[in-house]
Image (spheres, helix red, strand yellow):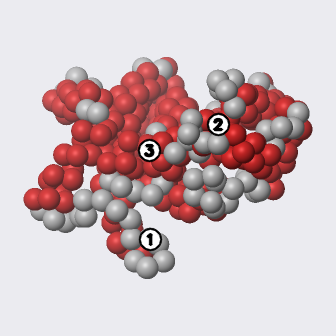
């Protein structure tokens, strides 16, 4: 198991380094001067030169990359041109919305998907199984933004149970802030839950056909005992893989939903930064999201070693 973790950690560090190189290189391949792009075509040469010096664009590429990586490690991400605010402060403020939203959406996804997937597998080829698979197919076909608008029309406009958008803040009204995230989380979770439910069903059915399941039944265990004691742990490895990818997708894919609900999260920040041509904010937020995806995949790999005993034996 130690060799397995060492290999995964080395891959984790190498992937982070490669991602940082790629993201930094994107700015270098932009046509023209990056400062000119950020200020627009109407900017004066003096303003472009001043911004270039402020951003260090007149320095060698290796020096700029090293300074950027050092800033990532120390939290000094520079100052936003559009907001005239430290980028790190902007990200921390927006992450206080996006992270709870992604966690809530992932929790809803896991509860719905695992419940429906296990139920469908336990009632294979019965009416409940057919109903779950039909509902999951509809869920996969629904676009997030359309479902978000539908939720607003039903629960905010007609029933008036929730607000149609906005975020009051955690300090002023914690319950209202949590309530403001429920509809966006549901809009994000529906599609992911539909996908995960189908994968859970398939994984459980595959394990149910194994010889050790028949042996457990022959020893006198009933269907429920076999399912909870033996099947779920073995079926959880492929499910865990998809859950890790889905959480990364929820964290990085909130741009549309946050804009529909006017939530001041990372997705909305990226959208606004692109509109304002604030490349420094875009670069740092993209690096943060890429790092989050890489970290989540690393955590999933570590959990493999805990769940799957074969990795402990082979160390691969």
Residue 19 vs 145, above or below: the answer is above
Residue at 36% x, 55% y: name it: 262
Left or right: residue 131 compared with residue 306 = left
Q: Measured from the top left, where is residue 60 in percent x and y?
A: 88, 33
Give the residue pinned by disc 3. 254
Give the residue pinned by disc 2. 36
Quarter of the figure with the C terminus: top right
Q: Which mark is residue 169?
A: 1
Which secondary structure, mark 1?
loop
Residue at 40% x, 57% y: name it: 263
Residue 110 image-quadrant placement? top left
Which secondary structure, mark 3?
loop
Q: Dots 1 and 3: beta carbons under 8 Å?
A: no
The mark that comes first in sequence, 1 or 3, is 1
The mark that comes first in sequence, 3 or 2, is 2
Residue 145 image-quadrant placement? top left
Left or right: residue 120 compared with residue 312 = left
The mark that comes first in sequence, 1 or 2, is 2
Q: Is residue 111 visible?
A: no
Residue at 39% x, 71% y: name it: 168
Q: Measured from the top left, where is residue 250 in percent x and y?
A: 47, 42
């Amino acid at each position: 198991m130690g060799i397995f973790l060492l290999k995964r950690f080395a891959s984790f560090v190498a992937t982070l380094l490669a991602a940082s190189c790629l993201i930094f290189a994107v700015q270098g391949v932009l046509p023209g001067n990056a400062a000119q792009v950020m200020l627009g075509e109407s900017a004066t040469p003096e303003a472009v030169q001043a911004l270039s010096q402020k951003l260090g664009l007149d320095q060698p590429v290796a020096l700029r990359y090293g300074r950027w990586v050092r800033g990532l490690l120390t939290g000094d991400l520079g100052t936003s041109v559009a907001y005239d605010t430290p980028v790190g402060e902007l990200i921390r403020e927006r992450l206080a919305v996006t992270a709870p939203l992604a966690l809530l959406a992932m929790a809803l996804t896991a509860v719905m998907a695992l419940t429906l997937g296990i139920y469908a597998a336990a009632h294979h080829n019965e009416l409940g199984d057919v109903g779950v698979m039909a509902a999951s197919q509809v869920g996969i076909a629904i676009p997030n933004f359309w479902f978000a608008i539908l939720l607003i029309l039903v629960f905010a406009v007609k029933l008036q149970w929730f607000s149609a958008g906005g975020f009051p803040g955690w300090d002023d009204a914690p319950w209202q802030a949590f309530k403001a995230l429920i509809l966006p989380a549901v809009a994000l979770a529906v599609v992911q839950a539909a996908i995960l439910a189908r994968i859970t069903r398939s994984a459980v059915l595959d394990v149910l056909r194994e010889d050790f399941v028949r042996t457990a039944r022959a020893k006198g265990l009933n269907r429920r005992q076999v399912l909870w004691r033996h099947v779920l742990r073995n079926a959880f490895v492929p499910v865990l893989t998809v859950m890790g990818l889905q959480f990364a997708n929820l964290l990085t894919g909130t741009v549309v939903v946050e804009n529909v609900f006017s939530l001041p999260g990372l997705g909305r920040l990226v959208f606004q930064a692109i509109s304002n041509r604030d490349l420094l904010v875009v670069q740092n937020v993209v690096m943060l999201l890429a790092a989050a995806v890489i970290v989540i995949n690393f955590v999933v790999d570590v959990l493999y070693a805990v769940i799957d005993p074969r990795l402990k034996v082979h160390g691969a």
